[in-house]
Amino acid sequence: MRGGLVAGGAHGPEHLRALTAVVLDALAEAAPARGGPLPAGGPEAVAQSTRALCSPVLPEEGIGPEAALGDLVRAVAEGAADPADPACVAHLHCPPLAVAAAAELAGAALNPSMDSWDQAPAAGVIEELTTAALARLVHPTAPAPDALITSGGTESNLVALLLARERAAPGPLRVVTGANAHHSVHRAAWMLGLPAPTVVACSDGRIDPDALDRALAGLAGAPLLVVATAGTTDEGRIDPLPEIARIAERHTAQLHVDAAYGGPLLFSDRLAAQLAGLEQAATVTFDLHKLGWQPVAAGVLAVADAAMLAPLSLRADYLNADDDTEAGLPDLLGRSIRTTRRPDALKMAVTFRALGRRGLGELVEHCVRTAHEFGRAVDAHPQLRLRPGGIGISTVLFRPAVADALSDEAGDAVVAAVRRTLLAEGRAVLGRAVAADGDGRSRLWLKATLLHPNAATADLLPLLDLVTAAADRAVSEPAEDRGEIRGVREASAADGTEVPGRERLSP
Ligand SMILES: Cc1ncc(COP(=O)(O)O)c(C=O)c1O
């Protein structure tokens, strides 16, 4: 049966060539058909058009590889929130580089699994070289730094807390983190059976060092781990790392830095200084599927000393029998909490060699520069207000000025409505963040997380008019007329009609 042909082996490329052509054609047709950063019509319309193309997903008799690929790739692409569109800026959700996506194809075709040498002989070496380079980037002066490939920031934070717990045995380890920390820090403590983290207040989105000092003093006697953030999810803020490292040392606390977002600043000669102090952390979370333009998944956990990874080592006779290891077969099992693992290092290594550190640094600088230019455009716009306190890495928070004329609650409702209206109309994917305003009160903001390595500021400016128009409607029309999510079904691309005035932002 043709659908049963394999991707690897001598004939794999031949099989793949025909099928990748189907995939590429479907992708090429889907983007203009979608006509914007995401499909119009909201969840119901997308579910309906997707189901129509994909059902039944497990037919009794198959429809063949070309037809199945054509249908499903079209469905997923027409219904995508595409981060390659400059108006898709809600999350730390990057447009992957073509070179990295192409490398994924080779990984998928060969399917090395990174848990034993006999499943990944060369892929294991590529992972070793890649992690060594990243380890040296994060801990340049440490005698024996190392790094693991993970599925992302959540797994990196979990493993960091696990390793800290083991170093703290018999414990129990007390985790102290900022109010700005990612939720995965709290979940990791819960999964590891640790007491809930002590949460330290922030000032302008960054850990307040005095509050940290007091919190650590209050836990004196317990083994301690401080978790700081370099690039917060909501605001892109970098905690004051040198001061935090000094305070942690004074209290003999271990230090983990979640640099899932900010880590790639290290690629840039101009921006790396913003991460001064990072090298003092025992462990560092560093994602490349955020500011590193890799397809998901591409996570990294860097450790200052390879010996810290000892708790992960274990024997399973079918994967790393003692006599195999003694005979020289590399033992990969202790490089992860997972067993079967994708060769995620391959796309990273391809990207690193293709662009070099300098090339990657230039892309990071582009995103940061674009965010500042976009922030200035927001600031100059009479109907918008930039959040006081400036831009964090490449994250810009702003709100329509009409929201400020209302009560706090009604103003926040306008901000939320603007976001949902633009989502439902398929015009823009903006994020939302609650953050302190200049008067110290928490307000809701629209969030633009700018990760597009090629988009120019001019490509982003149409977002401003989209926001102000949606805000005007939010204050003047009842919610049911705006049809924020559900009611725009009638005007959705799903039933072939155009949403009026929904033009594409240029890439
Ligand atoms: C600061 C920070 N840490 C960790 C994570 C979790 O990363 P992932 O989604 O790759 O697991 C995120 C996700 O946005 C993040 O912003």
Image: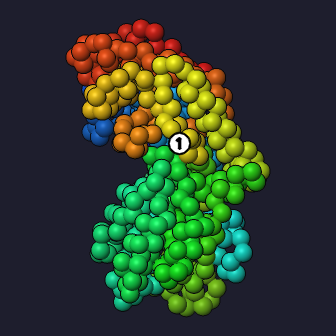
Determine the residue positioned at 54% across, 79% down.
249
Q: In this view, does 171 lie above or below 232?
A: below
Amino acid at dot 1: Gly
Viewport quadrant of the N terminus:
top left
Determine the residue positioned at 76% across, 54% down.
269
- The secondary structure type at the circle numbered 1 is loop
Q: Which residue occupies the foreground of this view, 292 or 492?
A: 292
Percent coordinates x, y for residue 140 in the rendering: 71, 70
**Res. 19 visible in picture:** no
**Res. 459 visible in picture:** yes
Q: Mark 1 points at which residue?
A: 389
User: Would you identify the image quadrant in which residue 276 lies?
Assistant: bottom right
Determine the residue positioned at 41% across, 78% down.
217
Q: Is residue 229 above or below residue 74?
A: below
Q: Is 448 positioned to the left or the right of 358 in the image?
A: left
Determine the residue positioned at 42% across, 66% down.
211
